[in-house]
């Protein structure tokens, strides 16, 4: 789980445990009259959280966007993810902890050589977000608001062992910010994000235009609606899939640039498990570095979720999602917020203990609530297990509104939040997955965009 990134400022490059000319609005004009902009209809969840169908055979890759094919807005051969940044991404994934940091017990991600090539990575999902780390008034007051586009990327290979979607995922987070405001007392070096809403409103207009063109049958001569529950994006299946994919790629290349990429995250395995989570931040001089977990001890950057062994979550987080929202945490702050000052819940509270179903429901309700829980007060494992664990435990009264049942996680070891999950236990093709946490964040995004940015 990773969020945030600021485009400029000395230490404002932060994280938050995502074009064709025809994408612009049409305007009507007449002699002696000023152009009039056509008002756009409200956006829906699938418009801002775009999930690609998981590939099943090599031919399916043609319908995806390869990370190595994405270039900047000038059309020059400068990739959005440079060779240098990709190399740091891989290195940080495999060696996240700093020299001299005591062993936490978390194992390291082990990536096969085939995954260490940028050509193996594809865009599994896109998240359009006008305000990381959250859109509630309390979160914005503490952190500011950081618009971003997050690309969820996953490796897919076709080698001697056959076609394979790997149980690994990354986040590339592109931010749209102005110079930030100074940090609040006790929260240095983290300034408060200041949104570049003019740049982000241009993205919103293009997303709305894509939606309208899809509904009008401009892609593949078939009319497609994006309304309804979250699912694999309906424009990315059937006759519209390839032309709509091309339009999405053009939109990304129109609005994204390498300079906006200042935060990354990765989740990978030490085969066949555990799953290990690491967040990364671009800082002056040092470049992209692994970031200590905001809910850990201020030292360790990696958190592990394991099936085997008595302890499934290592290090055990100390969350702060039941206290009033604060910009204090344990990532790069000196001193870090001590565990004794934190109050919160995590899925480790029931994964590593025998607790009643009613308590499980209470815990996951807090974690799925974007007004209470965010990257800086809730651990990565919690945000990536809050749906799969209660579903497979058949927790009474647990529901996932706004998500199509076909893409709910079917296995308690599915730690995908928004992407493709290949099961090493049951095999078969990778499963498209969307969680309650992703749906809650998306609902907030849709409400904010439609009320604050669309047609403004």
Image (cartoon, grey):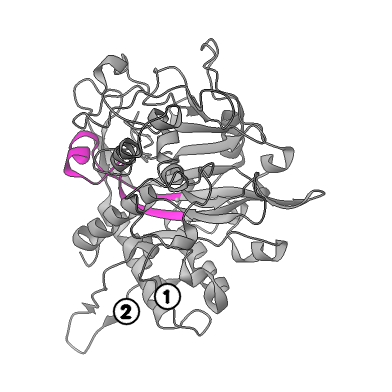
Where residue 431 appears, as percent x and y from the top left, is 57, 56
- Magenta stretch holds residue 304: no
Which is more toward the observer, 184 or 346? 346
Residue on which disc 1 sits: 22
Where residue 239 appears, as percent x and y from the top left, is 56, 79
Identify the element where label 2 is drawn.
Answer: loop
Who's the residue at 51% across and 62% down the image? 249
Q: Quadrant of the C terminus?
A: bottom left
Residue on which disc 2 sits: 26
**Can I make out residue 304 in this image?**
yes
Q: Residues within 10 Å of mark 2 (few under 14, many from 20)?
A: few
Residue 201 sits above or below residue 292 on the image: below
Q: Quadrant of the N terminus?
A: top left
Which is more toward the observer, 49 or 357? 357
Where residue 77 appears, as percent x and y from the top left, is 59, 53
Query: From which residue to which does the magenta span run?
Result: 126-150
Where residue 210 appears, as percent x and y from the top left, is 40, 71
Identify the element where label 1 is drawn.
Answer: helix
């Amino acid at each position: 789980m990773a969020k945030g990134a600021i485009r400029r400022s000395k230490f404002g490059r932060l994280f938050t445990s995502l074009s064709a000319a025809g994408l612009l609005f049409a305007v009507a004009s007449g002699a002696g009259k000023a152009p009039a902009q056509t008002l756009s209809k409200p956006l829906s969840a699938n418009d801002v959280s775009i999930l690609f169908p998981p590939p099943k055979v090599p031919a399916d890759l043609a319908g995806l966007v390869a990370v190595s094919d994405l270039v900047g807005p000038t059309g020059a051969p400068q990739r959005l993810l440079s060779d240098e940044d990709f190399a740091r991404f891989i290195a940080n994934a495999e060696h996240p902890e700093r020299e001299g940091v005591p062993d936490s017990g978390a194992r390291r991600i082990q990536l096969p050589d085939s995954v260490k090539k940028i050509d193996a990575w594809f865009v599994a999902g896109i998240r359009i977000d006008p305000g990381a780390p959250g859109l509630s008034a309390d979160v914005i007051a503490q952190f500011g608001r950081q618009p971003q586009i997050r690309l969820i990327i996953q490796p897919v290979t076709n080698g001697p062992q056959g076609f394979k979607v790997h149980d690994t995922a990354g986040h590339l987070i592109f931010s749209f910010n102005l110079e930030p405001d100074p940090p609040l007392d006790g929260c240095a070096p983290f300034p408060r994000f200041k949104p570049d809403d003019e740049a982000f409103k241009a993205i919103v207009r293009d997303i709305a235009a894509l939606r309208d063109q899809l509904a009008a049958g401009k892609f593949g001569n078939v009319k497609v609606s994006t309304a309804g529950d979250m699912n694999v994006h309906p424009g990315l299946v059937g006759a519209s899939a390839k032309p709509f994919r091309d339009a999405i790629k053009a939109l990304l290349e129109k609005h994204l640039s390498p300079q906006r990429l200042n935060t990354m995250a990765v989740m990978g395995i030490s085969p066949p498990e555990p799953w290990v989570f690491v967040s990364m931040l671009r800082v002056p001089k040092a470049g992209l570095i692994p970031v200590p977990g905001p809910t850990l001890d201020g030292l360790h950057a990696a958190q592990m979720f394991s099936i085997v062994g008595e302890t499934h979550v290592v290090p055990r987080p100390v969350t702060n999602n039941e206290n009033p929202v604060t910009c204090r945490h344990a990532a790069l702050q000196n001193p870090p917020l001590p565990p004794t000052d934190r109050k919160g819940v995590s899925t480790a509270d029931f994964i590593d203990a025998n607790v009643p179903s009613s308590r499980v429901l209470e815990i996951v309700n807090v974690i799925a609530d974007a007004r209470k829980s965010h990257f800086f007060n809730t651990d990565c494992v919690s945000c990536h297990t809050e749906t799969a664990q209660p579903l497979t435990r058949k927790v009474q009264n647990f529901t996932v509104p706004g998500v199509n049942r076909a893409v709910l996680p079917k296995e308690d070891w599915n730690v995908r939040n928004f992407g493709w999950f290949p099961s090493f236990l049951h095999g078969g093709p990778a499963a498209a997955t969307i969680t309650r946490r992703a749906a809650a964040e998306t609902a907030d995004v849709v409400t904010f965009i439609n009320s604050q940015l669309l047609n403004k």
